[in-house]
Image (cartoon, rainbow, N blue to C red):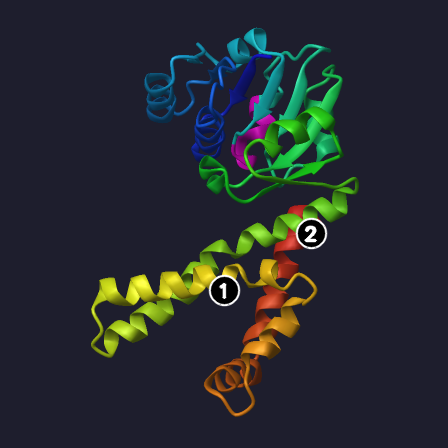
């Protein structure tokens, strides 16, 4: 298998980095020159990564092609390329449907959508694959967890989860800023917050039968400080506003 990337941004870099961290991994990889700095860095770091002259050269040299161009330019980029029937196309473009991608890359016979995350570089996180595809699932399962879905709407709904990362870190930054404002050093505050939230992230695995609301209730001791913060944020409509924002993101992704 020769693996090619049309679009060489942070996500392509993360996939290649994760892949090449595996022992004995020698899959030939061809990347487009779209982002010269990232492409050059990958080619310098890994001897079996080469930079193609252009996007069409990626297609000409590879049988599995991952599409990682920005959604805003995806249609313009893809309509200029000539795909082959034997190409297996894996689209990483979250906001363009599989059906539209399939039309743009015809006559390519196999089109799969996948949604890996940047932490795949560290062999962490999960990749959504739609529809189920044995080879695509096998590839990404080497880099982390794989969740296969058959329904496009289910894929779109799960994609909304990825819109919450920045807000999560803003949440932690708010805690960090308050602690620093009370006189605790920045490094000490960061170390403590990081340790606490790493441990909290493991709670669903250690109690697999408990849903998230039950975990919330477990930590919200009656009359305690966790219950106070949860109650005050709920009364101010924070979580309702958050859910409404998720709904708006879903409509954007689904194009409705």
Task: Name the residue carrying label 1.
Answer: 200
Front-most of 51 and 214? 214
**Percent of width and height locating residue 219:** 54, 77
Instruction: Identify the residue at horizontal 74%, vertical 14% (top origin).
Output: 107
Identify the main secondary structure in magenta: helix
Task: Name the residue carrying label 2.
Answer: 157
> Helix, strand, or loop for circle 1?
helix
Judged from this view, the residue extending furthest toward the front is 206
Instruction: Identify the residue at horizontal 68%, vertical 53% (top origin).
Output: 251
Instruction: Identify the residue at horizontal 57%, vertical 29% (top origin).
Output: 74
Judged from this view, the residue extending furthest toward the bottom is 223
- The boundaries of the magenta stretch are 70-77
Q: Is residue 134 magenta?
A: no
Residue 180 position by quadrant: bottom left
Q: Is residue 125 above or below residue 213?
A: above
Q: Using residue 192 as the reference point, say whether residue 60 is left or right of it.
A: right
């Amino acid at each position: 298998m020769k693996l090619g990337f049309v679009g060489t941004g942070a996500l392509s870099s993360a996939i290649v980095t994760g892949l090449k961290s595996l022992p004995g991994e020698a899959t030939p990889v061809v990347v487009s020159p779209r982002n010269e700095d990232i492409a050059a860095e990958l080619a310098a770091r890994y001897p079996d990564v080469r930079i193609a002259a252009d996007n069409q050269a990626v297609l000409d040299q590879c049988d599995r092609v991952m599409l990682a161009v920005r959604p805003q330019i995806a249609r313009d980029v893809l309509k200029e390329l000539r795909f082959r029937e034997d190409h297996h196309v894996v689209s990483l473009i979250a906001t363009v449907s599989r059906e539209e991608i399939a039309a743009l890359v015809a006559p390519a016979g196999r089109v799969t959508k996948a949604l890996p995350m940047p932490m795949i570089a560290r062999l962490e996180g999960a990749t959504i694959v739609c529809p189920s595809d044995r080879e695509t699932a096998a590839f990404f399962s080497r880099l982390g967890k794989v969740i296969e879905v058959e329904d496009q709407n289910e894929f779109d709904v799960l994609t909304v989860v990825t819109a919450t990362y920045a807000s999560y870190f803003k949440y932690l930054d708010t805690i960090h800023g308050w602690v620093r404002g009370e006189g605790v050093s920045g490094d000490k505050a960061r170390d403590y917050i990081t340790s606490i939230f790493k441990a909290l992230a493991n709670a669903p695995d250690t109690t697999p039968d408990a849903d998230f609301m039950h975990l919330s209730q477990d930590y919200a001791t009656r009359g305690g400080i966790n219950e106070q913060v949860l109650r005050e944020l709920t009364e101010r409509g924070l979580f309702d506003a958050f859910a409404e924002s998720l709904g708006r993101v879903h409509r954007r992704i689904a194009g409705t």
